[in-house]
Amino acid sequence: MTPLTNESIMNRRPAPVSRDGFFGRESESAELLELLARPDTSCLTILGPGGVGKTRLAMQIAHALSQLSVEPFPEGIWFVQLASISDPNLVPGQIAEALDLELSDSSPVDSLLSYLREREALLISTTSSR
Ligand SMILES: Nc1ncnc2c1ncn2[C@@H]1O[C@H](COP(=O)(O)OP(=O)(O)OP(=O)(O)O)[C@@H](O)[C@H]1O
Ligand SMILES: [Mg+2]
C-alpha cells in the first residue's frame, strides 16, 4: 500500500456539494451532527425508503461540517458510491478507489482497515437494499 501523509489525503476526491436548494430536515440534521460529534461514533446509518433524501441529507451534513471553523474531520470527507455494487468482495476496492489507495492483494480488507483506523476522516457511502 502506498504510504500517505495527512496532507495527501486532503487533496483527494472530496464529497460533492449540490448546488440545488436544500429544504427542511432540521431535526435530522441536528441529530446527525450531534451523533457525529460523539467520540464513540464510528458508523452511522441513515435508513429510509427509496428517494426519501438519504444521500442528499448526508451530503448536506458533509457540507455543513466542511464549513465549520474547526473541521471535525481534518483528514477529509469522502464519498464512495457503493449502491451499484452487488458483490461484497468489490467493496474494499471501491472504497480504495475513492480514497486513491492501493490495497494489498492478499488482504485488501485488512490493509484498508489499517489505513482508515487512525484517520480522522468521514467516509460517506451509498448502499443498495437489493
Ligand atoms: N431536503 C431536500 N431538499 C431538497 N432536495 C432534496 C432534499 N432531499 C432530497 N432531495 C432531492 O430529492 C431527490 C432524491 O433524494 P436522494 O437521492 O437523496 O434520495 P435517497 O433516499 O438517497 O434515494 P435512494 O434510496 O434511491 O438512494 C434528489 O434529487 C435530491 O436532491
Ligand atoms: Mg441515495
Image (spheres, helix red, strand yellow):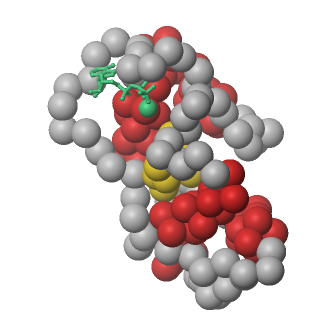
Q: Position of residue 54 (x, y in %)?
A: 46, 26
Residue 87 is left or right of residue 18, and the answer is right
Tell me what residue is drawn at x 40 percent, y 64 percent: 13
Can residue 100 be seen at all in this image of the molecule? yes
Can residue 122 be seen at all in this image of the molecule? no
Q: Nearer the viewer, residue 124 or 51?
A: 51
Tell me what residue is drawn at x 57 percent, y 61 percent: 95
Q: Position of residue 67 (x, y in %)?
A: 37, 45
124 lies above or below 105: above
32 lies above or below 88: above
Q: Position of residue 113 (x, y in %)?
A: 76, 64
Residue projecting furthest to the bottom: 2
> Residue 75 occupies which quadrant of the picture?
bottom right
Tell me what residue is drawn at x 60 percent, y 80 percent: 102
Q: Nearer the viewer, residue 72 or 17?
A: 17
Ligand 1 image position (quadrant): top left
In which quadrant will I find the C terminus?
top right
Residue 48 is left or right of residue 26, and the answer is right
In which quadrant will I find the N terminus?
bottom right
Question: Total of numbered circles in the picture?
Answer: 0
Residue 86 is left or right of residue 71, and the answer is right
Residue projecting furthest to the left: 20
Q: Position of residue 19 (x, y in %)?
A: 18, 38
123 lies above or below 30: below
Q: Nearer the viewer, residue 78 or 37?
A: 78
Tell me what residue is drawn at x 80 percent, y 39 percent: 40
60 lies above or below 13: above
